[in-house]
Image: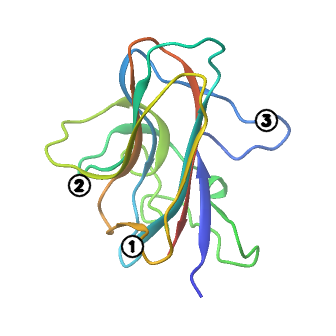
Amino acid sequence: MAKTYLVYNGPMVTTVGPVSVTTSAGLKTLLQLKPAANFPIKVIEWGISFDGSAAATPGKVELIDTGTVFGTVTAFAAADVFPFDDPNAPANTAGTSGVPLNLGTSASGYTCTSEGTVTATRYGDVQLLPPTAPYVKQFPLGREFGVVPGNCLRVRTTFAVAINALCYVLFEI
């Protein structure tokens, strides 16, 4: 049976709740994943929510594979990628050769500070969402969004005005 893992756009929560990330005005990657060699991932669910309190112009929200182009992110620690369905599943290992995700500032992490020059993409999902809306997408069994090792899976947003967001990806290996 496949093992599932969950990641958020922030560090593993311990004594405080999750911290929202500002989307910025314009394009911003909130979450980036790099599957390790021999560990293709299948996204089975992803979601995003915003803390807007008034109706406003929707923004673009994407689950996207940007090929081998990665942004510069805050790197995940090994504990930030955690087993979901089986608490006894192997934990993610640390570092840029970590398994099932490579961890590092140009690998898996959150809060992108430099997007890189993306030249090709493949969409898993794209939506126009208001800053007051939550969104969750579950892929049907057998129709999950797959990402090959070495490619970059991102959750990106494009808003005219910055808004705070929380997002996650639930994937299996």
Q: Mark 3 and mark 2: span between their CA atoms?
A: 32 Å
Label 3 secondary element:
loop
Determine whether label 3 and label 1 are within 8 Å by CB. no
Model colouring = rainbow
Residue 142: image location, x then y, percent? 44, 78
Q: Mark 1 and mark 2: span between their CA atoms?
A: 13 Å
Image side of residue 23 versus residue 78, left or right: left
Image side of residue 13 versus residue 148, left or right: right
Label 1 secondary element:
loop
Residue 121: image location, x then y, percent? 21, 49
The single residue placed furthest to the front in the displayed view is 55
Task: Answer with the quarter of the image where residue 24 lies.
Answer: top left
Label 2 secondary element:
loop
Q: Amino acid at mark 2?
A: Gly
Q: Nearer the viewer, residue 108 or 158?
A: 158
Earlier-in-chain disc, 1 versus 2: 1
The single residue placed furthest to the bottom in the displayed view is 1
Mark 3 surroundings: few (<14), some (14-19) or many (≥20) residues within 10 A = few
Does residue 80 sit above or below 157 in this rendering? below
The residue identified by callout 1 is: 40
Mark 2 surroundings: few (<14), some (14-19) or many (≥20) residues within 10 A = some
Residue 77: image location, x then y, percent? 60, 51
Q: Mark 3 and mark 1: span between their CA atoms?
A: 30 Å
Residue 171: image location, x then y, percent? 53, 65
Earlier-in-chain disc, 3 versus 1: 3
The residue identified by callout 2 is: 67
Q: Amino acid at mark 1?
A: Pro
Q: Amino acid at mark 3?
A: Gly
Mark 1 surroundings: few (<14), some (14-19) or many (≥20) residues within 10 A = some
The answer to whether residue 62 is visible is no
Does residue 54 sit above or below 132 in this rendering? above
Task: Answer with the quarter of the image where residue 84 lies.
Answer: bottom right
